[in-house]
Amino acid sequence: MRALGGNPRGAAEALTIPAAALAVSLILFGIFVALAGADPLSVYQTIYLGAFGGWFSWQNTLQRGAPMMLTALCTALPASLGLIVIGGEGALIIGALATVAAASAIPAAPPFLVLAAMLSAGMAAGGLWVALAGGLRAYRGVNETIVSLLLNYIAIALMNHLVTGPMRDPAIVHRPSSWPIGEQNMIGLIPGMEVHWGLAFGVVACLACYVLMQHTVFGFAARIVGGNGRAARMAGLSVGTLTLITCFIAGAAAGLAGMIEIAAVHGRASSSLVVGYGYTGILVAFLARQNPLAVIPVAILLGGIEASGGLMQRWHDLPDATVQVMRGIIFLVILASEPFYGRLRIFRERTA
């Protein structure tokens, strides 16, 4: 689960397995759609057109890829310590709720102050949410995967309680929703594009995390912990502190995704936030081999697949959930390919 290192040859070789796994996934998906009565080649063409076939498709893809980048970091960063955290969905929701609360607490403040408050609240809430899983792992020995998964369900339950009770906007009667953050506090679009600024936030976050984990003392210490926790303790490293800080940063990235979903898309919290970006982020992180830099193109690729779902429904009479089947196939094949990494390293060492 470790991120790709600084060896260009090793990185290139390690990327061949995700590429091969993706190719196998496409073959299996083609068999699936053929059994469903559709032409696989035509379906592949539709996916390409819906994802990258034109400027409109590209913008739709980039719009969906932005939150995937940030939720993928929620899994990719703790993986450098050998942790498997799958709590991006919960951190996104908690960050969204904190964003609404921050905007509602200072309704008369200038927009730039409200934006700063929403940004800080969303990231802090998401960071603390995932740091809880990291803390339980570091100091109580509780499995972080199970804890982060359960925290997702707790976050959804908490949101449902708040938007139907204390935070409900009485003006919205058809669906329980929170108070709005106000049109003046919404994040606008990137000039010349129909894509909100969340894309820029996602790219910058991935670049910053790559530098942090690959080119700083902190990142080096985290990789030592991921390689051998016992040796890290003998070297005097504070494994608990490193775990808490890394999980906080990871959760802050997913909390930022929640803030962006509120401030750039929805304007208020509701069940529409639960669309699975956090779970897709897990797949993005695995395909990217936990490398924050590789998260960017992989998130765009998966965003394009998500964007093509409507076209497959209209053009091939396939359910909109067909893209979820494809996503599931990719995830299963990636998991099945994991043992080949060890064999690849052994082969490389023997032929070096």
Image (tube, rainbow, N blue to C red):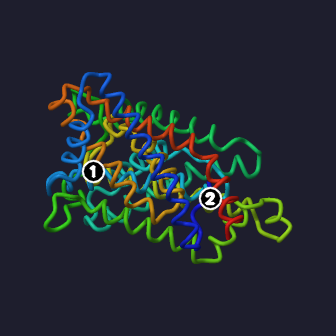
User: Is 251 rendered above or below residue 173?
Assistant: below
Q: For the residue marked with disc 2, what is the amino acid?
A: Arg
- Of all residues, the one furthest to the top in this rendering is 36
**Rendered residue at 31%/36% (across/down):** 272
Indicate left or right for 163 with 267 as reference: right
User: Is 270 rendered above or below residue 60?
Assistant: above
Front-most of residues 225 and 150: 225
Indicate left or right for 62 with 97 as reference: left
Tell me residue 207's x, y (percent): 44, 70
Secondary element type, mark 1:
loop
**Reading the chain from its start, which is encountered first: label 2 or label 1?**
2
Front-most of residues 341 and 310: 341
Q: Residues within 10 Å of mark 1 (few under 14, many from 20)?
A: many
- Disc 2 and disc 1 in contact, CB within 8 angstroms: no
- Of all residues, the one furthest to the right in this rendering is 234
Q: Quadrant of the C terminus?
A: bottom right
Tell me residue 230's x, y (percent): 83, 60
Tell me residue 150's x, y (percent): 58, 35
- Residues under labels 2 and 1: Cα distance? 39 Å
- Of all residues, the one furthest to the front in this rendering is 351
**Rendered residue at 30%/44% (across/down):** 305
**Rendered residue at 55%/71% (across/down):** 9
Q: For the residue marked with disc 1, what is the amino acid?
A: Ile
* Residue annotated with mark 1: 181
Front-most of residues 13 and 256: 13
The answer to which image quadrant residue 278 occupies is: top left
* Residue annotated with mark 2: 2
Disc number for residue 198: none
User: Is 53 rendered above or below residue 322?
Assistant: below
Q: Closer to the camera: disc 2 or disc 1?
A: 2
Q: Residues within 10 Å of mark 2 (few under 14, many from 20)?
A: some
